[in-house]
Image (cartoon, rainbow, N blue to C red):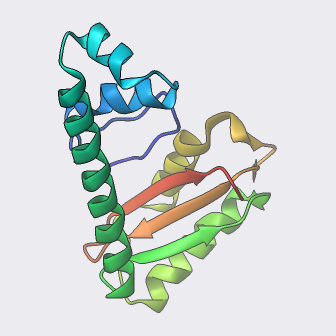
Amino acid sequence: MRIHMPAGQKDHNISFLTERQKEIMRMRRKNLKKAEIAKILNITRQDVTILEKRAMINIEKAFNTIEMAYEEGLSVRVELRKDIQILDAIKEILAAGDREKIRIKSSIPEIFTILKICQGSNIKNGIIQKGTEASILPDGSLKVRQINDW
């Protein structure tokens, strides 16, 4: 079982990005100029440009792959609204698996734990205060991530 955790706690053993690409993307997010990044990393400005461009291509491919999986029915997306009771969220996830005839590998207590790890302090009195997206893969694996704009 692989658990997707909130920011700062992620486990990205498998990524479409190299460590250097992630480092450059973080620096660009902080509005550093390419020349500044090149100086910090002791590489050329051209290398920064190339690595950033490849990172963007890889990110786009990753998003396209996920969307294709949903569109082709290879994965089931369950969008859970904010302010939902954690037990209702579990029911929705299990119901989606049943509708699609996919037996979810995780037990109810495991799904509860996955949601608690994903949402952390966003759960108050059994209510998930931020949106959540759960993906059910064909083998019954469950992936969960927080949606900040819900």
Q: Is residue 68 left or right of residue 76?
A: left
- Can residue 1 be seen here? no
- Against 134, is 113 above or below? above
Res 116 quadrant in image: top right
Along the line of sight, which residue is nearer the eye, 83 or 33? 33
Residue at position x 64%, y 65% in the image: 89
In the displayed structure, 131 sits above or below 15; it is below
Q: Which residue sits at x=54%, y=44%?
A: 118
Q: Name the quarter where the C terminus is drawn.
A: bottom right
- Residue visible at 33% across and 35% down? 11
Picture coordinates of residue 32, whole percent (x, y): 46, 21
From this viewpoint, is residue 94 visible? yes
Is 55 drawn above or below residue 69 in the view shown? above
Residue 105 image point, x, y percent: 33, 66
Horizontal arrangement in the rendering, residue 140 relative to residue 113 (left or right): left
Which x, y percent locates residue 77? 48, 74
Q: Nearer the viewer, residue 126 or 119?
A: 119
| Vertical position of residue 39 compared to residue 136: above or below | above
Residue situated in front as seen by the camera: 28 or 123: 28
Task: Tell me residue 56's x, y (percent).
Answer: 32, 49
Quadrant of the rendered image containing residue 142: bottom left
What residue is at 55 percent from the left and 62 percent from the top? Answer: 133
Side (left or right) of 15 relative to 122: left
